Image: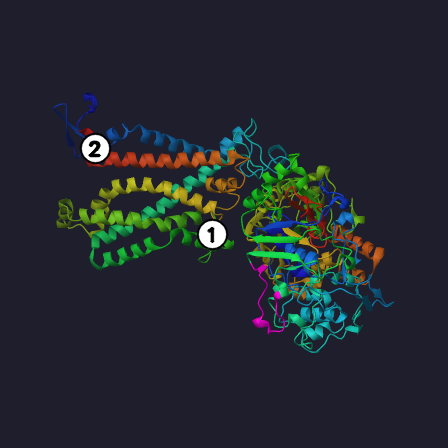
Amino acid sequence: MQVASEPTLTAPQGEPLDVAISGRVVSLSPRQLFWREFRQDWLALAGMVFIAVMIFLAVGAPLASRLLVHHGPNQIFINQTLDEFGLPKGPNRAFWFGADDAGRDLFVRVLYGARTSLVVAFFATGISVVIGVMVGLVAGFYRGRVDTVLSRFTDIVMSLPVLLLALGLVAGCGLSSRGCLGGTVKPGLLLVSYVIGLFNWPYISRLVRGEVLRLREKEFVEAARAAGASNFRIMSREILPNVFAPVLVFTTLIIPNNILFEAALSFLGIGVPPTTPSWGKMLSDAGSIFTVAWWMMVFPGLFLFATTLAFNLVGDGLRDALDPRARSRRMT
Amino acid sequence: MKRHARLLALAASIALAAAACGGGGGGNKSNQTPQAGLKKGGVLRIGLASDVHQALDPGREYYTIGWEFLKCCLARTLLAFNFLGPNEKGNDLAPDLATGLPESSSDGLTWTFHIRPDVHYAPPLQNVTVTAQDFIRALMRVADSKVAASYPFYYSAIQGFDDFSAGKAKTISGLSAPDPATLQVRLANPVGYLPYVFTLSASSPVPPSPSDASAPLGVATGHDQNYGQFVVSSGPYMWKGADKIDFSKPADQQAGPPGFQAGKSYVLVRNPSWKASTDPLRKANIDEIDVTVGGTVADLTKKIEAGELDTMDALPAPEGIRDYATNPDLKPFIHSDPTFGTWYINMNTAMPPFDDIHVRKAMNWVVDKSGLLRLVGGSIQGPIATHAIPDSMVPSLKGYDPYSTPNHSGDAAKAKQEMAQSKYDTNHDGVCDASACKNVLMVIDQTDPQPKMSALIQQNIEQIGISVNMKQFQTTTMYTKCETATERVPTCPSEGWYADFADPYAFVTGLFSSVSLTPSCCDDSLMGATTAQLKEWKYSNTTPTPSIDDQLNACVPMLGAQREQCYANIDKALMENVVPWVPYRFANQVVITSKRVQNYHLDASTGWISLSQLALAGGA
């Protein structure tokens, strides 16, 4: 059993929660409860730390590459990195992760690849979350025909063959420098993010709709309605904050999926532009010669694996920490 | 030539994984066994990663591998070569079904071929001999629009050929057979390359139909699109079971031979009618050739290493090449020989900034050709190209290098000197500062290693202020975009060109003549475009582009050394006065074979293994 240290367990402002610990009653805020649970999950903490490091590396990739190796991700070093048959050389003092088969520094490209993965992780997931929450919120709150229409639309999107459609869209919009939809969508990382984001929102929508259907019958919603609050206010001020926790948990769990989806698109050759480093593309490039250039697969693969694992661990930790049932199970 | 030459090149380049044919270099001949030590017999087993393209129809097939099966084995022609490599006199014309080289009239308009006597077709027509009329039949088939032959343009110089093709005449007036052993060819205008077009399989003889002697296309009648399996062989091999074909039946009721299973397998067995005494060019050591279609390059490579296959149509992966090239046990079984191909960066002479010759010259100075060569697999893939026409076609050009840089790695200083003279470098500091140099569209082939090579080119030309917007496409799409003037593509760095035969006419005309401009193919650099054409294609700069049409036309009727010098001069004009390309590699053909394959030679006329010369260890 976990015992909170007394001096820190002061009753917070707001809505305290009474918890019986060692026969004493201590009031903890939801945030304190969450943190107390989360910090005990060392795997989730490790994941959080790793993600923070990756964000730091991704943001600082240009600076790091300039300071550490003095060149960018697309600079080619033919004579230093390729043998006479055009095969890349492995890790050495000058090229820590070795080189890829184009004669580029794999270390710098892995660093820059983190940028690609994290942009997709947050931007594409952000699109999914925004659309999913809005659709789910409206469908669950209004019910009836609105719910029927939105839910069927959600079902339709869920039934689409995502990978095939994504392949088609990315390839279609990537064929011309003008992109598609009148130039609104242009080839590149953002296009990939749009495509990923636009196909993943139904899962969040369903989750939110279910939560909203439950919450809209609660007393505090009834109270707000009795007080004359508008539907918009009820949705935004009363219900939305209460679906935050499950959405957060689910978001952390779909981030790795999105990272892997981008990697898959890049692996298939239609993801990010050729000059944009991407772990998926690096793995794709490594596929044909990994027997003689293991480093081309190992380093981007390790980072991709570690990053997705980190997000999954954080997601699991969040779910456990935010789920009262899980908490009670652990406490008993 | 033109588009079709390009397709041949493409086919070779795709199927051979990185590059297929091309020009200069030496070649590994360490496993060659003296002819005297060779034994006859055995079954050669070939794995094809990709099928032939036009079902081995002599008039339509336009694929390196398909050409070899036809030229080696099935479809002899009036003239041929010795079926050896360019460095083994493989470019020299030799009589095949003709008794000698053709006689030309003094005006160069009439050519006479004498047909070798006593050459019989394969069963079931073993009693039929090859006659002059059979060649006329073949060329009528080439001209027949229903057949959609792949390269009828080579025969356009024959009087009446185009009229027949257009349906304006019932015969080709320029072809006549005064007697069964004499073929006369009358030309509308003299062309020095004429003998070469009678080495192409489309001109191989078509025997008369046994059931209808008046059928204009003989046994090919009714087989407009599927003649490949019904070819009555004049060579040392025939399709297994071809002797059972009943040509007395209507074409649609004839059953193809079991040895021809399109897309799956092809089996060639000895043609009992063939006699070595009437065919001095082909050794025909092997008894049978079994071809299977399918499998990955890795699988096929393993099967060759294990001795389950003898060769394949594809190049091993780079590590495989390294294994073969560095392992003393394997080294004798990797072969690299020059062909008639050049890989190059194309520049559209009508599109800024490449409408300025100084920019084009600066490109030639700055590109790291040795780096490009290394990215494509190293020197085994061919020597660095220092000019346009492969040395293998015009040997006198060997050593000509107007943009020589240390180790062929590019020289930024010289490039900047050149760029400083350009109108696009307004402050003349050697770095292009005009907007035309920014974000220049570069259309590339997405097939490995082209994107990597394009990235190196991108890095190279940034030194002279040119930045690119790189777009990659599937190979055929890339070529279509680059050869279509209305696409207005400034530069295409992934292009390769292979000539259909050893004469330089086949190399340069389709590339640099204004007759090859859109809607024809493949004057991708838009040489010879007029103001009216450029306006029609919506170019911003409508100044006529450089033209070498007069020089090209002047070379056409020439013969011998004068002809070679003429084309050498064209090459120099291209490299120094026009500069439409940055040529970077004369492509070699690289092939691996099993340890039992002996007497390997490249067949310069096809750019692939010379099947007619191979032998197998132990023979039968």
- Give the CA separation, mark 1 to mark 2: 46 Å
Q: Indicate the amino acid at tag 1.
A: Lys
Q: Looking at the picture, how far across and down is residue A55, in whole percent?
A: 41, 34
Quarter residue B498 falls in: bottom right
Q: Give the range drawn in magenta.
A: B244-262
Q: In this view, does B475 lie above or below B104?
A: above
For residue B257: magenta?
Answer: yes
Q: Is residue B460 above or below residue A49?
A: below
- Tell me which chain the residue with mark 1 is part of: A
Horizontal side, residue A18 vs residue A286: left or right: left
Q: Indicate the amino acid at tag 2.
A: Arg
Q: Looking at the picture, how far across and down is residue B184, in whole percent?
A: 80, 70
Q: Looking at the picture, how far across and down is residue A218, in whole percent?
A: 15, 46
Snapshot colouring: rainbow
Horizontal side, residue A203 vs residue B584: left or right: left
| Residue topped by disc 2 | A327
Marks 1 and 2: which is nearer the front? 2
Towards the viewer: B565 or A115: B565
Q: Looking at the picture, how far across and down is residue A245, in whole percent?
A: 25, 40
Same chain check for tags 1 and 2: yes
Q: Which of marks 1 and 2 is nearer the N terminus?
A: 1
Towards the viewer: B19 or A36: B19
The total of numbered circles placed on residues is: 2
Quarter residue A79 falls in: top right
| Residue topped by disc 1 | A186
* Residue B368 makes an appearance in the image: no
Query: Magenta residues: mostly which secondary structure?
Result: loop
Image quadrant containing the N terminus of chain B: bottom right
Towards the viewer: A280 or B146: B146
